[in-house]
Amino acid sequence: MKSPHIFQKFSKKKKYSIDNQMANEMLQNVFAACDREPNTIPFDKLILRRKISTRAYTIGMFLTSLILAITFFLPLAFPPTKATVTSLGGKEEQLKIISHRVEQDLFYLELEDMDISLTDSYMITLDGDVYPAESFDSNTGTLVFPYLNQEVNIYIYDIQGNVLQILLTPKQ
């Protein structure tokens, strides 16, 4: 199978070989033609030095490639997980909103959890003003906050200390 033209320049080049004695004679002739003093290091030692420097380069490239591959594949070792709220008892619970509505400047949140801490739940504006929850109906699970018609963060705590943070942004 013939490789396409674009890949031909990446193919391995032909290797030429010459015996060491002939290569040493050619090197001495080149030094003599350039009016330089002859080479005193045997040609075998020159080749050995070249192989040693190439070996360190090859090992370095292999280690660098290995570290790069580990860096790319390391995130696959940590699969994504769902965020859950864990109470002190080890039971996993999630505070869930069933519905919400705005009526007469009040914001109603109906929650699935009936153990909401009214004293710990609050709303904070972007200016830093804090508004406590106005009421909580444990029969329906409805928590009531004042509706300010501006962007606010609402923090709802249950009696186990779990928290649900809500960003409320009014429609413009």
Image (spheres, grey):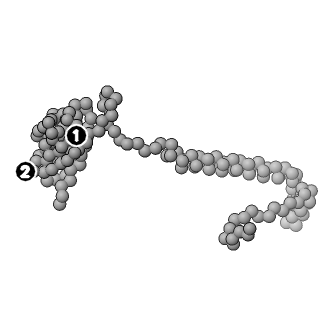
Left or right, residue 77 beside residue 64: left
Query: What's the residue type where badge 1 is placed?
Result: Glu
According to the image, label 1 marks what residue?
112
Of the 4 image quadrants, the one containing the C terminus is bottom left
Q: Position of residue 147 (x, y in %)?
A: 12, 49
Question: Which residue is found at the position 11% from the left and 40% from the top?
Answer: 134
Depth check, front residue: 155 or 115: 115
Query: What's the residue type where badge 2 is placed?
Result: Gln
Depth check, front residue: 106 or 16: 106
Mark 1: give few (<14), some (14-19) or many (20+) Cα within 10 Å: some
Element on which disc 1 rests: loop
Q: Position of residue 19 (x, y in %)?
A: 90, 57
Instruction: Measure the alpha-carbon separation of dots 2 and 1.
Output: 23 Å
Name the residue at the top extreme.
89
Question: Which residue is found at the position 84% from the left and 49% from the top?
Answer: 45
User: Which badge, 2 or 1, comes first in the chain's sequence?
Assistant: 2
Depth check, front residue: 118 or 35: 118
Mark 2: give few (<14), some (14-19) or many (20+) Cα within 10 Å: few
Q: In the figure, 120 relative to 47: above or below?
A: above
According to the image, label 2 marks what residue?
104
Question: Which residue is found at the position 92% from the left and 60% from the top?
Answer: 22
Q: In the figure, 164 relative to 65: above or below?
A: above
Depth check, front residue: 70 or 98: 98
Q: In the figure, 14 relative to 96: above or below?
A: below
Name the residue at the left extreme.
104
Q: Nearer the viewer, mark 2 or mark 1?
A: 1
